[in-house]
Structure formats: C-alpha cells, structure tokens
Amino acid sequence: MSGELLRAGILGATGAVGQRFVSMLSRHQLFRIERLMASSRSAGKPFSTAVEWLMPGDPDPRLAGMIVSDCRPTDDLDLVFSSLPADEAVNIEPAFARAGIPVISNTRSHRMASDVPLIIPEVNPGHLDLIRVQQARWKSRGYIVTNPNCSTIAMALALAPIHRVFGIEKVIVSTAQAVSGAGYPGLSVMSMLDNAVPYIRDEEPKLESEPRKIFGTIDGDHIRSSPMVISAGCTRVAVRDGHLMHISFSLSKPATETEIRRCWETFVPEISNLSLPLCPERSVQYLDGDDRPQPLLDRDRGAGMTVCIGRLRSCPVLGWKCVALGHNTIRGAAGGAILVAELLAARGWITAG
Ligand SMILES: NC(=O)c1ccc[n+]([C@@H]2O[C@H](COP(=O)([O-])OP(=O)(O)OC[C@H]3O[C@@H](n4cnc5c(N)ncnc54)[C@H](OP(=O)(O)O)[C@@H]3O)[C@@H](O)[C@H]2O)c1
C-alpha cells in the first residue's frame, strides 16, 4: 500500500505549522512523509528530540525516530510542503522547484509572484493553470503553489459564495487572531495574558492584497486582480487557535438577508465531486446563535476545515456585515495546503517519480 503513496517532505517540520503537517499526514490516504526538514539547529537529531511537540497525543513512532535533515532537494520526494519562515523560503522553495519538486507553501515569500497560484481549492482551482507558466520559468516539472495567509483564507472563503452571485465591491475587516498564528514559542505569556495587541507585523497588507488575487482572473501568463477594495485591521488576542473576524461588505447587486444566507447554505464548490480526503462536507457553515461563531466552540468544525459564519446583519456604512472564524493552523495553514496538494494530485500535477 505505502508503495502507491506519493512521497512528501516537510520544510520547517519542527515549527507550529510543520507539526500540524506531521500530525495530519501521519496516516494520509495519498501522501507518506518521507523526509522531515528544518534548520541546522534540528538537522541530524531524531524528530522527537528536535521538536517541542504541541499536538495532542504523541507523534507517529516512525516519524518520532526519523532523523531531521536540512532543507536540500533530494530525488526521493514527489512533493514538499513548506512552513518555513519567509526569509528562508525566498531561496529554499525555488531550489526545490528548480530541482523538479512541486512545493506547496504556507509562506508569504512567493504568494504575490505573477506566475505563482495563490489557491483556496473551493474558490479558485482554475488558477492552477499558471503552473505551466512557472514550469517554463524553472525549466523543470517543479513549481510553487501557495496557500493564502491564515486570515485571508477564512475571509475569502466566507465571502466567495456571496461574491460569485452578487459581486463584492468593498470590504472592511477587523480581526482577533490567535497566538498560535505567531509560531512557536511566539509571544511571551507576560505580553499576552490579560491583553490584546492591536498590531500584527505585515498582516494587514496581506489581507488587503491576497483576496484580490484569489478573486482575480487568469489573463495570459498572470492573474488580473479583482477591483475589490479592502481595508484591514488586525489584533492578536489571548486565544490559542482560531482567527475570528468582523467583516463589513458592499455588494454590486441588491440582495436580501435570505438571499445572502442562501449563498452560504447552498455553496457547492467545483471540487466537491473529486472526493478529496480533506475536503469538508461543508466548506462554509452559517451558525444561528447570536454569539457564534466562537474559537473555543467552533474552530474544530469539519475537523478544522470548515469556516464558520454568523451574525449576518445590515451595516449602516457598507450595507452588510457578519462574523467569520477559521482554524489558523488547520484550514489557514497545514490543512489548507494538504487540500491543495490533494487537488494537485487529482488533476495530475503531482505524480510518483
Ligand atoms: N502559525 C500559523 O498559524 C501560520 C498560518 C499560516 C502561515 N504561517 C506561515 O508558516 C510559516 C511557518 O510558521 P510557524 O508558525 O510554523 O513558525 P515556527 O513555529 O517559528 O517554525 C519555523 C520552522 O522553520 C524552521 N526554520 C527556521 N529557520 C530556518 C532556516 N534558516 N532554515 C531551515 N529551516 C528553518 C524551524 O526549524 P528549527 O526548529 O530547526 O528552528 C521550524 O521548523 C511562516 O512563514 C508563517 O508566516 C503560519
């Protein structure tokens, strides 16, 4: 059975997102972890020694004993998942693409490059066509496909069902983001306990630019961005996992509350007929309670892959507003990237070497 699985490497395997990859890929139907890679601090050590394991339960025994290696391409990999810091990903990810290895990345470094797809599988799977342009650039069968920022994924998935029917023109979003979004060990307890910090470095520009690429259209060898205008304010709060956000939006066509609710309730993504293992039954779910969604109660819906929405009501400034919640290290990082890889495999973009 394992011989049929695609051989995956994880770049940044010891980090907050890397561990989530290890946990989610331990018993995956399509992928088998072949290599765990991290910095020179970890290379040469067994994974269980190199990592400060934060996931529930123990790591899979086969992986706990695997020796961590440095981030260099080898010919025993069919794909790599990357959760490297942005400064490191700038050079390491292209080295893998050039060596013929598909890279599915969580890092911001290449997200906005003109020929790099920025993918939410349920929203813009057609953008994967840009892979051909990139393969010509690398002169290789390798490429980089990116996962959006963790807040962008929740917001874009929440808005996509409405945007496709009524067109969204303007958005104002204000986030309350979990501490796990800052990686491990992240912020000190002293700076977060009894506190909220109204600044997250580089976060607001990502929320203002990435959805425009995701909702954009392919124009030859690049994406023409959507004209949607977005204003974002981001705050770090003392929550472990789950990014919550208030979103106000204006529509290009008039809609009623019932019609907007129906967009979420009837949303069937194009990829739903592919039976991808991590595709949740519901990619978006509207919750009726006045005080929902909440990180503690709702972040694990759909095994962390469902974006929850609530509190749809009129907005005196832009017309409509709601609340959305996404699990940042599952839907917003490792889970989102694994779903991208499942889609790539289903479409024949990743094959056994
Ligand atoms: N946390 C989230 O919710 C989230 C969500 C979406 C996207 N992201 C993005 O995902 C990436 C990783 O985030 P994280 O939160 O997992 O960070 P993290 O906990 O700090 O982990 C960083 C990982 O990168 C490795 N690394 C550091 N320097 C390296 C180097 N010079 N060469 C090779 N490997 C190196 C570390 O290995 P060592 O242990 O050996 O140092 C570790 O495995 C970031 O780009 C982040 O923006 C994070």
Image (tube, rainbow, N blue to C red):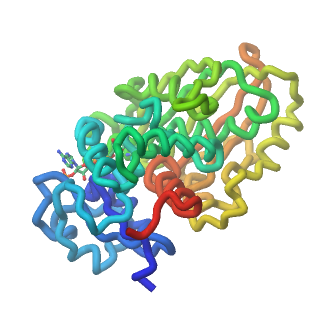
Image location of residue 327, percent across then percent down: 51, 49
Q: Quadrant of the C terminus?
A: bottom left
Q: Nearer the viewer, residue 246 or 275?
A: 275
Image location of residue 153, percent across then percent down: 55, 41
Residue depicted at 80% across the width and 49% down the height: 265
Instruction: Tell me the quarter of the picture where residue 22 sits.
Output: bottom left
Q: Nearer the viewer, residue 115 or 216?
A: 115
Instruction: Tell me the quarter of the picture where residue 135 sits.
Output: top left
5 left or right, relative to 247:
left
Residue depicted at 28% across the width and 58% down the height: 13
138 left or right, relative to 153:
left
Q: Nearer the viewer, residue 285 or 100?
A: 100
Name, please, the residue furthest toward the top. Answer: 317
Question: Do we see residue 246 in this rendering?
Answer: no
Task: Name above or below for residue 268 compared with residue 245.
Answer: below
102 left or right, relative to 172:
left
Image location of residue 119, percent across then percent down: 54, 43
Name, please, the residue furthest toward the bottom. Answer: 1
Residue depicted at 41% across the width and 82% down the height: 2
